[in-house]
Amino acid sequence: MDTAAIIDRTRELLAEHYVFPDVARELDALLAARLAAGAYGVTTPEELGALVTADLQSVNGDRHLRLKFHSDQVPDGDDSAVMQQVARSFELSLGGVPHLRRLAGGVVHLELAPSLFPVEWAAEGITAAFTLASRGDALIIDLRANTGGDPETVALVCSHLLDEPTHLNTMYDRAGEVSRQFWSQSHVPGRRFGGAKPVYVLTSGTTFSGAEELAYDLQQLGRATVVGERTGGGAHPRRGFTVHPHLEATIPTARAVNPVSGTNWELVGVAPDITVPAADALDRAHHEALAELDRRGGDSPVLAEVRAALRAGRSVVEPVR
């Protein structure tokens, strides 16, 4: 393992791509000094990745800034490592929609995990899931095990939950210029869930990056209630560069700015509207959804039964069998 070459290449990538040039200069000096002092005198790529990642995150805490170890050898090229991993996860998770079910009272539980996969891959499954979910009276979107993904896929999900094209997010490059805006779409294939029925988003400390954006966008628009734990706090989209057969330098190249808040969730995470342990979030969101549907009224026989159970203090969180 040519440690000096790996560090030098990582420094070059920071100088060329990192969204905050002043931080990149500070990190460049830090890595050079640490290399000269013999701090990286380890024998395995995994050990080197851990040491360098700690140094990369020591200045501003950016959790997307890493020298990431991959146990499987990864090909050369930008984003090759992450795309190899993403393709494997996509096949094992039913295209990112591993769980869809109807709970008591017409509430739908839809899990999106482990990632919001590239929209050209994920659109078919997400469209199918939301077409089914559209028949529900309320929706719980479960992001507790979701660690990020494609902002285009975030926009697609939001499009199923909003009735009009809506500005969701703006990306700014390292020069401070707008590089991309994301909007919900005026048309979606399949059926919309729509912009009126109750929506709840479940989060955990594991929820990260693009999944955080989905929770944050819907929360800032007042379209969803976030239930669970504060999320991980990663708002900077990144690119990946192979610097060794088992090491990928992940470098954030832009920063997200929400049009409502004027800021993002970097370092602070998305604060839930209702804070509960992640393990309890589904039950709590289901209860909140049923209570909201009860407040709105309606003549569904199932919902009438649920109202009676709520008034009697009985549990209604078990799914309909």
Image: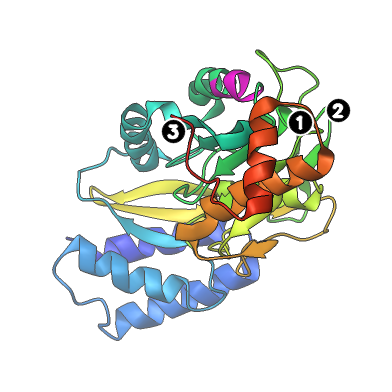
Query: What residue does disc 1 label?
Result: 184
Report the amino acid beneath label 1.
Answer: Ser
Q: Where's residue 193, x and y in %?
A: 71, 26
Q: Identify the element where label 3 is drawn.
A: strand
Position above or below: 40 against 177: below
Q: Can residue 217 be seen in this snapshot?
A: no
Q: Which residue is rendered at x = 71% and y = 26% of the image?
A: 300
Q: Which residue is rendered at x = 54% and y = 23% of the image?
A: 129
The quadrant of the image that shows the C terminus is: top left
Q: Which residue is rendered at x = 64% and y = 40% of the image?
A: 306
- For the residues marked 1 and 3, what is the alpha-carbon distance in whole angstroms? 24 Å
- For the residues marked 1 and 2, what is the alpha-carbon distance in whole angstroms? 8 Å
Q: Identify the element where label 1 is drawn.
A: loop
Query: What residue does disc 2 label?
Result: 164
Q: Identify the element where label 2 is drawn.
A: loop
Query: What residue does disc 3 label?
Result: 99
Mark 1 or mark 2: name the one nearer the start of the chain. 2
Q: Which span is picked out in magenta?
A: 129-134
Q: Quadrant of residue 23?
A: bottom right
Q: Where's residue 273, x and y in %?
A: 70, 61
